[in-house]
Amino acid sequence: YKGYQTYLRENQLIDFDDLLIYPLELFTDNKDVRELYQNKFDHVLVDEFQDTDVIQYKILRVLGQKHKNLFVVGDPDQSIYGFRGANYDNSKHFIKDFNAQEVVLDKNYRSTNLILNAANKLIANNFNRPSEKNLESDLGQGMPIIFNKEQSDYQETFYVINQINQLIRNN
């Protein structure tokens, strides 16, 4: 790791983590730069907030300190990037740090009620959920859910491809 970091410095390179760490260090250590960017952005909007990590949240907190005009959109029940550092608790920190109001959007415009009812049953088992929700749709009941278990990711891929091809042929 030390050799890798030395190589990056000697060749004036940065990696993905540096794209987050260096701006946070700059905002933390340099008041003029911090204030420049706090003044530059009157409003900060963040989508897919459930996928933010600790460093990204710290950057957001610095940028939003002055105007406190932050708007984040995210669904903690869709947080699937914990393996790469996404922090489920950022939603709770945001509400506390900015005295934010949480708005739960229960209406779904893409899925049918059979799918949403199954999702609601799964979501109800999530731990430490910040709020309750019951997803609904105006798109009707929809087609029955098909459950299929394959022995490998390759077999699963071929199953999905075959299902898509069958749907195309039937329509």
Image (cartoon, grey):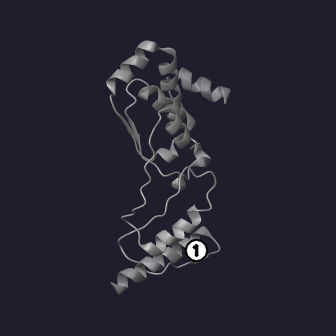
Q: For the image shown, how many numbered marks are present on the structure?
A: 1
- For residue 121, what is the image quadrant? bottom right
115 above or below 59?
below
- Measured as percent of width and height from the top left, residue 20 is found at 50, 31
Looking at the picture, tell me which residue is in the foreground, 138 or 52: 138
Residue occupying image coordinates x 54% and y 55%: 77
Q: Can residue 134 be seen in this view?
A: yes
The quarter of the picture where the C terminus appears is bottom left
Measuring 61% from the left and 23% from the top, which residue is drawn there?
6
The amino acid at mark 1 is Gln
Q: Name the residue under label 1.
A: 155
Q: In this view, does 47 lie above or below 145?
A: above
Left or right: residue 66 versus residue 149 is left
Quick one: which residue is furthest to the bottom in this view?
170
Along the viewing direction, whichever of 6 and 144 lies nearer the viewer: 144
- Give 147 or 124, whichever is nearer the viewer: 124
The residue carrying pointer 1 sits among few (fewer than 14), some (14 to 19) or many (20 or more) residues within 10 Å by Cα, namely few
Coordinates of residue 126 in the picture (x, y in percent): 61, 58
Task: Establish if 128 lies above or below 146.
Answer: above
Q: Quadrant of the N terminus?
A: top right
- Splitting the image into 4 quarters, where does residue 113 fall? bottom left
Q: Considering the numbered disc 1 on the image, is that residue within a helix, a strand or a loop? A: helix
Q: Residue at x 52, y 30 (%)?
A: 58
Residue at image position (42%, 67%) is 136
Asked whether the viewer can see residue 15, the reply is: no
Q: Position of residue 67 (x, y in %)?
A: 37, 26
